[in-house]
Image (spheres, rainbow, N blue to C red):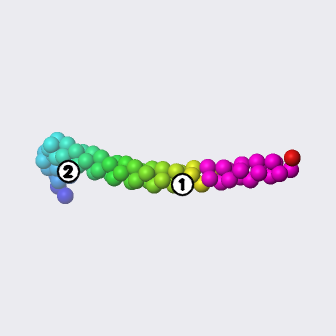
Amino acid sequence: MSLSPDSPLPSHYQLANLNWHPTVDMKVQSYALEQSTKQLRNETEQLKKENARLAVINSRVDRFEQEHFSSLNQALSTGDSSAS
């Protein structure tokens, strides 16, 4: 590696700095943002599906509780009236 007289850096580092283009950095950042956005959208869709699934399960639990407690109340009221 050769060194230029005015810089302690090897010449290939100097060339890399000369060939640096801010548009390339912007494209890389833009791509990274697009990928992050895509991943967040996928995660959001997964969460929506999970929420819908949990809503169905919750409605089944609610229905079960209503049926269970209504039959329990009927049994208690039937037992109370026969004891009187």
Task: Tell which residue pokes out farthest to the bottom in this image.
Answer: 1
- For label 1, count other residues whose C-alpha is less than 10 Å away and answer few (under 14), some (14-19) or many (20+): few
Most foreground residue, 50 or 22: 50
Instruction: Please state, as top left, top right, bottom left or bottom right, where the N terminus lies in the image.
Output: bottom left
Residue 45 on image: x %, y %:
36, 51
Q: Is residue 81 left or right of residue 33?
A: right
Which residue is rendered at x = 45% and y = 50% of the image? 51
Residue 79 belongs to magenta span: yes
Q: Which residue is mark 1?
A: 60
What SS does tag 2 mark? helix
Mark 2: which amino acid?
Answer: Tyr
Residue at screen point 57% across, 50% down: 62
Give the residue number, with chain letter if any, for mark 2.
13
Q: Is residue 40 visible?
A: yes
Q: Going by the image, does 47 lie left or right of 77?
A: left
Q: Residue at x 81, y 48 (%)?
A: 80
Visible residue check, residue 8: no
Q: Secondary structure at mark 1?
A: helix
Q: Main secondary structure of the magenta part?
A: helix
Q: Earlier in the sequence, mark 2 or mark 1?
A: 2
Badge count: 2
Label 2 environment density (alpha carbons within 10 Å; few <14, some 14–19, many ≥20): few
Report whether 55 appears left or right of 24.
right
Q: Residue 73 placed where, x, y %?
A: 72, 49
Residue at horizontal 37 percent and vertical 48 percent from the top: 44
Q: Report whether 77 appears left or right of 84.
A: left
Residue 50 at x, y percent in the picture: 44, 53
In the image, what residue type sits under mark 1?
Arg
Magenta span of residues: 66-83
**Whole-number angstrom distance, CA of label 2 to CA of label 1:** 66 Å
